[in-house]
Image: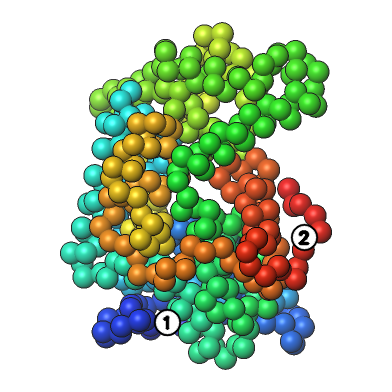
C-alpha cells in the first residue's frame, strides 16, 4: 500500500522508566491525490480491545475510503499481535462470550450459573499468571499508557495536531487521549464508542439498560405494526415471560465435539445473552420468537442459538486476548470489583456471565496503573461526531447522549448536538 513503515520504541512504564521497552508498528499512508495542505493526519485507534488492523488490507482500504484524501496513520497499540511484547492468551478464546460467541461455556456449559462462572474465571487467572511469568509489567497496558504512546508517535512524526478516528473500544481510547493530551486533537470521530466512564459501572446497571433495549424493540414493533400489536398484547412482559419459560424448560442441543457428543444448555439467561450479542441482526425476528417460546414452541431456537455454527475449537487470530483482558481490567484502576462483588452480581443476575466483561476483572491480578481521574467523564471543547446504532445493546444512542451531556457541576460545553445519529 506504499506506506512509510516505522517501529516505535517507548517506555513500558512512562511514569517510572526502567529500561523495559514496548515496540509498536506504525504505518503512514499518504493519499494518491493530496487533500487540504492544512489538514492534520487521521490517526486510527483500533478497537476490540486488542484487534489488529495491521495486515488487514480490506479494513485499511475502507478506512482510506472513509477519510478521503487525507494521510492515514495506523498502528498496533502496545500488547497487540504485531507489537512487542504481545500479550497472548489464546486459550481465553474458548470461554469468552466476545470470541466464542453464544457457545461459550460461560453461557452453555451448565444450568448452574456458578459452575459457568468458574469456567471463565479460571482462564482469566491463568492469562494473568502467564503474562506475569513472561516478565510483562501487566499494569502498564491501559488507555492511559496507550495515549502517551500515541502522543509520542505524533511528536516524532512531526505533527502538531491529529484528527482522531476510533472504533468501539478504540473510540474510548480516543476519549482518553483527548483527556490527557487535550491540545493535540483538532476533531474526532467516535465510532460506537465503548468508553470507560460508562463501561466501568456496575454490570447489573448496564445489564438492565441492555434488557430494556429488548423491550424497546418490541415497543417499536407494536407502535409501527397493527399485526405486531395483536400478537404482543403485553409486549412489556414478553421478554420476562420468554425468559421464565426457558428457565423452567431449557433448550438443550447436542453437538459434535471431535469424536464425542456434547450437550449445550440454553436457559433464560442464555436467551438474554444471545440477544445482547446478536440483536443488531436478530431484532426483526424477536416478536415472533418471544411468542413461540411462550407457547412452548422451540422450533426456531436451533437457528437462534446458531447450533449449526458450533465450532469445537475457537480461535481469534487478529486478537491479542491478553491485551483484551488487560485493557478491560486495567482501565478500571482501583474500581475493580472483588470476587465477592462479582459472585453476588451473578447470583442475582446470571445473564451477566455473557454480558460485558468488567465483572471478571475481580480475578485479574493487578490494578491498572492509571490516574484516579481515569474514569471521570471527559469535559472537552473539541468537536466530535459520536456514531451509535439504535439496535446496539452495548453502546447505543444513550451512550451518545451521555457523551455530549455537560456535567452538572462542571462548566458547560461550547458544542451542542444538532441531531441524534441513529
Q: Residue at x 28, y 45 (%)?
A: 339
User: Could you tell whether 84 is left or right of 352 in the image?
Assistant: left
Task: Please tell me which residue lies in front, 270 or 253.
Answer: 270
Report the residue at 42% width, 22% height from top: 267
Q: Is residue 216 visible?
A: yes
Answer with left or right where residue 247 lies relative to residue 140: right
Give SS at disc 2: loop
Q: Provide the secondary structure element on which disc 1 rests.
A: strand
**In this view, which residue lies farthest toward the left?**
133
Name the residue beneath numbered marker 2: 417
- Comparing labels 1 and 2, the label whose residue is closer to the camera: 2
Residue 186 is situated, as x and y percent measured from the top left of the image, at 68, 78
Residue 7, disc: 1
Q: Is residue 111 above or below residue 366?
A: above
Answer few, some or many: residues within 10 Å of disc 2's Cα (few below 14, many 20 plus, some between 14 and 19): some
From what the image shows, is residue 193 above or below residue 397? Answer: below
418 lies left or right of 177: right
Give x and y (percent) for residue 82: 39, 69
Q: Report the Cα–Cα distance between label 1 and label 2.
A: 39 Å
Q: Quadrant of the N terminus?
A: bottom right
Whichever of callouts 1 and 2 sits on the residue coming sooner in the sequence is 1
Amino acid at each position: 500500500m506504499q506506506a512509510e513503515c516505522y517501529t516505535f520504541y517507548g517506555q513500558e512504564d512512562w511514569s517510572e522508566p526502567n529500561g523495559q521497552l514496548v515496540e509498536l508498528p506504525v504505518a503512514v499512508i499518504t493519499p494518491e491525490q493530496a487533500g487540504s495542505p492544512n489538514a492534520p493526519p487521521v490517526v486510527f485507534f483500533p478497537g476490540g480491545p486488542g484487534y489488529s488492523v495491521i495486515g488487514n488490507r480490506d479494513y485499511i482500504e475502507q478506512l482510506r475510503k472513509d477519510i478521503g484524501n487525507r494521510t492515514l496513520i495506523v498502528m498496533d497499540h502496545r500488547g497487540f499481535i504485531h507489537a512487542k511484547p504481545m500479550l497472548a492468551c489464546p486459550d481465553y478464546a474458548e470461554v469468552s462470550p466476545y470470541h466464542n460467541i453464544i457457545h461459550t461455556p460461560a453461557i452453555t456449559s451448565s444450568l448452574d450459573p456458578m459452575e459457568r462462572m468458574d469456567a471463565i474465571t479460571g482462564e482469566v487467572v491463568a492469562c494473568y499468571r502467564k503474562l506475569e511469568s513472561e516478565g510483562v509489567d501487566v499494569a502498564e497496558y491501559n488507555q492511559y499508557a496507550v495515549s502517551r504512546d500515541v502522543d509520542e508517535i505524533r511528536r516524532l512524526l512531526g505533527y502538531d495536531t491529529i484528527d482522531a478516528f476510533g472504533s468501539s473500544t478504540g473510540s474510548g481510547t480516543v476519549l482518553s487521549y483527548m483527556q490527557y493530551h487535550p491540545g493535540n486533537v483538532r476533531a474526532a470521530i467516535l465510532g460506537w464508542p465503548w468508553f470507560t466512564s460508562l463501561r466501568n459501572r456496575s454490570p447489573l446497571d448496564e445489564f438492565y439498560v441492555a434488557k430494556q433495549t429488548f423491550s424497546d424493540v418490541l415497543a417499536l414493533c407494536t407502535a409501527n405494526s397493527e399485526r405486531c400489536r395483536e400478537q404482543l398484547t403485553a409486549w412489556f412482559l414478553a421478554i420476562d415471560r420468554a425468559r421464565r419459560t426457558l428457565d423452567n424448560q431449557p433448550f438443550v442441543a447436542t453437538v459434535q465435539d471431535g469424536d464425542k457428543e456434547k450437550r449445550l444448555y440454553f436457559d433464560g439467561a442464555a436467551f438474554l445473552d444471545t440477544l445482547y450479542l446478536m440483536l443488531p441482526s436478530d431484532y426483526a425476528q424477536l416478536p415472533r420468537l418471544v411468542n413461540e417460546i411462550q407457547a412452548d414452541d422451540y422450533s426456531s431456537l436451533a437457528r437462534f442459538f446458531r447450533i449449526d455454527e458450533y465450532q469445537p475449537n475457537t480461535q481469534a487470530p487478529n486478537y491479542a486476548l491478553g491485551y483484551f483482558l488487560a485493557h478491560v481490567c486495567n482501565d478500571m484502576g482501583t474500581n475493580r470489583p472483588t470476587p465477592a462483588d462479582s459472585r453476588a452480581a451473578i447470583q442475582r443476575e446470571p445473564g451477566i456471565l455473557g454480558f460485558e466483561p468488567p465483572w471478571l476483572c475481580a480475578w485479574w491480578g493487578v490494578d491498572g496503573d492509571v490516574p484516579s481521574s481515569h474514569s471521570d467523564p471527559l469535559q472537552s471543547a473539541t468537536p466530535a461526531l459520536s456514531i451509535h446504532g439504535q439496535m446496539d445493546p452495548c453502546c447505543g444512542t444513550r451512550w451518545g447522549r451521555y457523551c455530549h451531556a455537560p456535567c452538572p457541576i462542571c462548566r458547560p460545553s461550547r458544542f451542542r448536538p444538532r441531531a441524534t445519529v441513529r
